Amino acid sequence: MEMALTNKKNFNEGGYSAPEEKYKIRKRKASPGDIAFHICNGIFMILFVVITLYPVLNTLAISLNDGTDALRGGIYLIPRKFSLKNYATVLQKDNLMIGAVVTVARTLIGTALALITNAILAFIVSRKNFIFAKQLSLFWVITMYVNGGMIPIFLLYKGLGLTNSFAVYVIPGMVSAFNMLVIRTYMRGIPDSLEESAQLDGAGYTTIFLHIISPLCKPVYATVALFVAVGQWNSWFDAMLYNRMSDNLTTLQYELMKLLSSVTNQSSSVEAMKNSSGSVTPMSVRAAATIITMLPIICIYPFLQQYFVSGLTLGGVKE
Amino acid sequence: MEQKKRLFKNISLVEFKRQRVLIIWSVFFVAYGLVFCYAPLVGWLMAFQNYKPKDGILHSAFIGMTKFKMLFSDATFIRVIRNTLAMGVINLVATFVMAILFAILLNEIRLKGSKKVIQTISYLPHFLSWIIVTGILHDALSGSGIVNELLTKFHLVSQPINFFAHEEYFWPIVAFANVWKETGWNAIIYLAAITAIDPSLYEAAAIDGAGRWNKIKYVTLPGIKPTIIILLIMNIGNVLNAGFEIQYLLGNGLVQQVSQTIDIYVLKWGISQMDYSLGTAAGIFKSAVSIVLILICNTIAKRHGEERLF
Amino acid sequence: MKKKVVSVILATCMLGTVLAGCGKSSGGDSTGSTDSAASGSEESGSSDGSVKEFTAFFAVPGSEINDDNEIQQILAEKTGVKVKETWLTGQTAEEAIGTLIAGGEYPDFVDAGDGSVQMYEAGALVALDDYLDKYPNIKEFFTDQEWDSLRQSDGKIYWIPQFSNIYGEERECTHNDEAFWIQARVLEWAGYPEVKTMDQYFDLIESYYAANPTMEDGTAIIPYTILCDDWRYFCLENAPQFLDGYPNDGSVIVDPNTKKIIDYNTTDTAVKYFKKLNEEYKKGIVDPESFTQTYDEYIAKLSTGRVLGMIDQWWDFSNQTEDAIKSAGLDAQGCQYIPLPITIDESVKNQWHNSGGIVHVSSGLAITTSCKDVEGALQFVNDLLDQENHNLRFWGVEGTDYNVGDDGMFGRTPEMRKIVADTAYKASHLCTYSYFPQWTGTSRDGKNAMKPEGQEAEFYDGLSDSVRKCFEAYGAKTYVEMLGTSPAPGAWYPMYTFSQTMTTSTPGGTAWNLMGECKHQYLPKVVMAEDFDAGWAEYMEAYNACKPEDFLSEMQTELDRRIAEAAKYSN
């Protein structure tokens, strides 16, 4: 058995040891220094959790509060005048279901495509012997820092027939240098010896990618999948820019943006004014929309989390 | 072509055959990149034109470097570069250090359950829009907000501080907001990298009598070093992308000298004046700076034998 | 072997997708346009026999309505046309219009806002001149002089401004514009005194604050606050023009006698006004957070009833705060705002409120060259201006959204008022086609107002007791009567329709932008300055460095042009 490592120096220094041995650590007695460390760490984590949880709970409280009442401020963790009107307003939005279906579809397809392509690209450029590895890396690194601007990109997509189509959600952003580099870094940490021994067995690059490298890359694949999925889930600008006129290609976030814009407009525009604006406000609707879009991600996350919290998932590879 | 021939000599025919599948894929990725990332750069021509929507990129009049000259002769533009750079660097350092620190410390939490819960909570603010986060921040830092309440309670100040009225507080507030919103999210990459560290290394370190600190220092940190370096170089390339929304939402007339970034400048003096060329010129400037920066960093990394971008 | 197959399959898949993308582009034009805007007008209507579908894009944020909106459906049955409207979301108007022009495919109707001239230059709009005579309701919408003011450089008319057009007698109850506002309870406490000058206004606030430093529940009172968030800083900067008794020309004062442009930023009144604010700031009357608060924070303060007074436009604060104040029961305490006719000196007559509509010549509803049925589109605009359809748009369905009394007057029950304000109801039921031409003023029946907000009885019924009591004390029935109405200013009014369109392509436009930046930065400093005179001198130095004279001379040129233009019609 052999473990994959991120760094060859560790690999050499640490030598090989059977995975079972790691459990022995827990049996050792903690030193006073360790105890102090854990106490400080615990306090730090508690503080951190309080500070990061607050804005989320505050948003939740506002989303459950009567909108007009919330205008007066002073709502922290608990709604003052409980109301489900904000959620009702969001859920009554026309086309919301279509948007949700399209968003789920683009998240699934987009993530799958992006993961496959980025993994393949990362695999190619992380091969030591590959003659164009460096050039191909540079080619993609540069794409991170250049941008033709909104109008040329719009014209390009229009020319390619991507406007008014679902493809515009999943094809243009498919390969991303950032995600590729994240995977590549991880792949480079895998010892060359694995590839070499497979090669001696007559395995081609396809086999090495599918059966040797990829199984070891589950944590980083999970990471990149999460990045892509969240990006897809939250995106609306492309729907607005390229598919504005196609109602059946709208996305969840775009519908929510439009709703927010409607509510804002009703409460402040010159044209729609003079009548009282009802009990929802831009602030309260925004809070409800935020919570609604966050929920699915909170639910899905634990499934991805098992790939990178445990630290024990790396499978061994036969020698 | 030249280069290819030379490389041909360097590798054996067998090896080349073996790499055929890699080359086929490379062709695909180059084609894809050329179409989706490089083709739109035709738009950079706009920077050298007096772009008018009615004429399009093909027929707008060329005016050479006029737009660039306009930018660099404007004291405001020089100031917004300074602001962008300063905020970019402060944000980079703050978010970067905090994310790594958080990932490492989280990894030290022994209780599996609480570890998962903390991590889930930590990245939630990522899903809040800037307008919500800045709203809460404004609340907390207002005259009657929690921060001033604490400061007066502990007699650190006699009068509430009006944080948003002073230029010196602006950059730290922006940095804090970034850390607040993104630390947990940014830490995900490092947590993934930590999973790949061989647990036996910790065991070996323990046998050598290493405490928590030393294990972090000699095992965890070296283990995620390649990831750290790659992300550092990438982020350094992005220092001029310090943002737009947060500065726009937190800024006001009193601090506009330090709050305006390149992106705000472009919106104000370019797009909203129907000047589409100015923004393109500023974009080219940012790209050039980014590429120079990553070339420098990459060379340094190479010299030190560290992981690098290319 | 197997692996090779897999990789080849994957490779072809990937290349396939790219090729498919490319391949589509050749046929793309046809598919693209069937879905899109452009051709909506042609077939879909005739194919199902009855309703033509048009598309519209408005380069402003707006309220979307549902696809199955009820009143839209009724209007479609009556006119044979349905328009799918889309609005600006998350982009600036300039970006949206830039992309639209680059793409070269347009919706049938467009209001390009600030990008209107760009659309015209790009040849994207249809000249309306030859059509106007065929559509009486459209023709009637403007006088010949007003139509002529809409002509572009080629002498043709391309767009129809939609708003502020008065039919018959003007009907305004609310002063929808700027004023010094004060809470009704302050006036009540002082026995409803005459408050006519800035000094009297601040004296009143000071004495009330001295007697009542907190609310009933103990919250500290903020005597006076100034909204200064981004473009809303007009609450701080433009009061000098009103204090001197001029109307809201926005960017400058026009002297009606000499026909000269005056810069209100540098007048003696401006100095007095900012000096007063500076004094009040030092006394603790002006909210110390004035210049850093966001709009949301400002609304929150007003909604809690803590703020005694401020300058603002009614539309900027009322919709949200009036509701919040009422729902918290603070209207009973008199926390709603009343406008006061304040000037710098009692001898100066105020012009906070003017009668007459404003034609915003710089943008309006236009029909694009992508529209396949220009006549059908204009017929629809014409139909929307029919009284019956107009009532449907703004009053709703009779019996559901309003009742007709025996005297023929329209009115709403409290339940109706509540439901028409509901966001979801607005989306599913009401359809105002809010960016299509519309009237204000009096309905063609000679009794009702064109829009519910102009209906006096409706307005008076909706008032709270404290406001009504206050109005009675001053012998007023409406907000407008609190200020008194001044006649419409000269033909040039308002000058801000010109300054709004200025860009950095001219020296004047550059100066105008720089002046804005400078005022944003220095005016708060001036108000907060330890030494006002030194602060003011510093501000003036920075201000003069922006070359305001470039701006003013371009404004003067425009003023002269407008006056000359108007002179053609004086006979």
Image: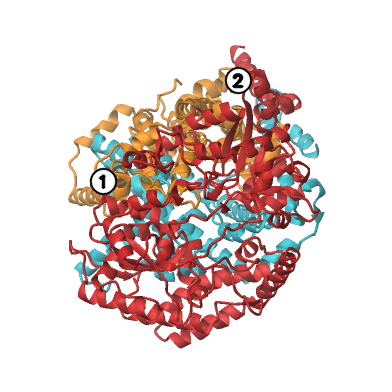
Chain colours: A orange, B cyan, C red
Residue A111 spot, x, y in % from top left: 51, 29
Image position of A79 (left or right of C482): left
Identified at 76% across, 35% down, the residue is B4
Name the residue nearer the viewer: B251 or C191: C191
In the picture, the disc for residue A83 is none
**Residue A204 - label:** 2
The circle on residue B209 is 1
User: Can you say whether C525 is above or below A146 in the image?
Assistant: below
Tell me the kind of residue under disc 1.
Gly
- Residue B290 in which image quadrant: bottom right
Quarter containing the N terminus of chain B: top right
Distance of label 2 from label 1 (alpha carbons): 44 Å
x and y, in percent, of residue B103 in the image:
36, 44
Residue A5: which quarter of the image? Answer: top left
Position of residue B125 measured from the top left corner of the image (x, y, whole percent): 37, 45
Left or right: residue C173 versus residue C472 is right
C469 versus C342 height, above or below? above
SS state under label 2: loop
Q: Quadrant of the C terminus of chain B?
A: top right
Specify the subunit that label 1 lies on.
B
Q: Is any atom of residue B18 visible in this view?
A: no
User: B52 above or below C539?
Assistant: above
The quadrant holding residue C297 is bottom left
Task: Judge by depth and name the residue closer to the eye, A163 or C416.
Answer: C416
Chain containing the residue with disc 2: A
User: Is residue C45 shown left or right of residue A254?
Assistant: right
What residue sits 49% from the left and 32% below the top?
A: C71
Q: Is residue C359 left or right of residue C269?
A: right
Give the amino acid type for the residue marked by disc 2 in the picture. Answer: Gly
Task: Tell me: residue C173, above or below residue A189.
Answer: below
